[in-house]
Amino acid sequence: MMKQHQAHRSPLDLAGVGIGPFNLSLAAHLDAVDELEARFFDQSASFSWHPGMMLPDVTLQTSFLKDLVSATHPVSPWSFLSYLVANRRFYAFLNADFPAIPRQEFASYLAWVAAGLPGLQFGAQVREVDFDGYAFAVRLDNETFSARNLALGVGLKPATPDFIDRLRPGAAFHSSRAAFEIDRCAGKRVAVIGGGQSGAEIVLNLLGRGAGAPAHVDWISMRPNFLPLDETPFTNELFTPPYVASFHSLPEARRHTTVEREKLAGDGVSAETLAAIYRRLYVLRHLESGGPSADLLPHREVINAEPRDNGCQLIMRNGMDGQVDIRKADILVLATGYRYELPPCLAPLAGRIDLDRSGRPRPGPDFAVRWDGPASARIFALNAGLLSHGIAEPQLSLMAWRSAVIANALAQRQVFDVERPEAMVQWLDAMPHEAEAGGQA
Ligand SMILES: Cc1cc2nc3c(=O)[nH]c(=O)nc-3n(C[C@H](O)[C@H](O)[C@H](O)COP(=O)(O)OP(=O)(O)OC[C@H]3O[C@@H](n4cnc5c(N)ncnc54)[C@H](O)[C@@H]3O)c2cc1C
């Protein structure tokens, strides 16, 4: 049964800043907890999942079973299966038998949930959050909400190299804007910087644009080769609650080195995308004439870019032989990833939140960050815990589990079963205590 949303009373038990998949999953869990009143705010006019990377034919890198709720609340009306049934496409979806489902399909599922779930407010930018000693004051343009707890689900910010500030406007765009800007690449020399999934999807798209294709594509990666996402079973164990519990129990310095070592488990390119790029290059090189030329440049660190003519000159160090390479490009596509930033609306509280050396808050086992306010006023941070909870944190894989842990913490009872399943791998000799892993509400 869907919860009947009560008329707003003050203060809320929880105010959510941002409605991406992560806070949406939390909202879907809280919808099943009658005693809690929550409200979530997003600055966008309506739900939209990374619209700037919604290129044709892109696919989800995770199983659709890792949806907003199924791992922890499979009877929820907000599961992917409920979406298929409600939209009369259950049988067709099964028959299509996608090896990886279209990202558009998952985005459409998320938008369906966002349209049906009560307590979500779009077109509502949170301008400022302050604390009056008892509750948070969450200020929008024309309203202020009072809430006992906060959930920060504001996502990550595009990470760009410093040198782009020196380039002329329009000479570069970040991958998060690709769908809006990619048409500008027609007939140009384009350099795509970044050897992860976004860079790969953009290169594949550029090479297949027919009449609108660029004249030339350079694909530059700092990694020593164009490396695949590792999707084998023991690597997938890194995306399970027992692994997160083991990781969380490590000292901070060891967590930093572990995350670095595990990068390709979350950031590599899917094998299908790599194969599609290779095949497209083969066709362009041997079977078709008139398409774009392309150079693949792994093991290159771009150390600078300077304005030249209408574009720029890239200076790179080749990690294989240590030499400096120079290339010209009309347009740079920066598939350079994302970084965590405490949202500007938190400025009144910023000095009170304990940050690690990378500027991230420190989420505890229940995702509440360390700050100097009373223990009854918690700030839950979602997608902030790469260094506290590991490489699963920015992915969809454990979002339902994280939401269930937070919902239990808010309700102060075990509403959802978040007992750790038996681990397939014994990561540590002494497993951390259940409560430290968020196992107890
Ligand atoms: C192109 C792309 C594809 C991905 N595909 C996968 C995948 O296949 N599998 C996987 O596991 N992971 C994937 N990820 C990683 C991850 O699942 C997504 O980035 C996911 O969207 C993160 O969700 P989020 O809720 O933290 O943030 P976001 O989706 O970024 O949402 C944050 C929201 O907060 C809002 N906001 C920010 N500040 C405010 C404010 N002050 N007031 C109000 N609203 C605010 C924004 O408008 C936004 O809607 C992908 C990431 C990208 C970039």
Image (tube, grey):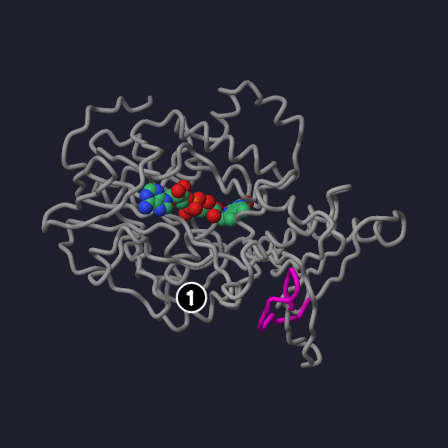
Quarter of the image for the N terminus: give it: top left
- Seen from the viewer's position, the closer of residues 304 and 96 is 304
Above or below 111: residue 408: below
Identified by mark 1, the residue type is Leu
Question: Do we see residue 18 in this rendering?
Answer: yes
Task: Give the residue at mark 1.
Answer: 428
Instruction: Give the residue drawn at x 74%, y 46%.
Output: 213
Q: Is residue 37 left or right of residue 104?
A: left
Which residue sits furthest left? 133
Q: Secondary structure at mark 1?
A: loop
Residue 72: quarter of image: top left
* Residue 89 lies in the magenta stretch: no
Magenta residues? Answer: 298-313
- At a point 41% along the width and 72% down the height, the residue shown is 254
Q: For the view shown, which residue lies furthest in the front direction? A: 309
Q: Is residue 348 above or below residue 302?
A: above
Q: Residues within 10 Å of mark 1 (few under 14, many from 20)?
A: few
Instruction: Please provide percent x and percent y for residue 357.
Output: 34, 70
The correct choice, above or below, for 417 with respect to 81 in the image is: below
Q: Position of residue 12 (x, y in %)?
A: 18, 36
Q: Quadrant of residue 223?
A: bottom right
The picture quadrant for ligand 1 comes to top left
Residue 118, how many percent across, how many down? 31, 27
Taking depth in this image into account, of 298 and 429 the one nearest to the observer is 298
Q: Say which of 289 and 248 sits in front.
A: 289
Residue at coordinates 64% horizontally, 56% vertically from top-left? 331
Is residue 396 shown to the viewer in this render?
A: no
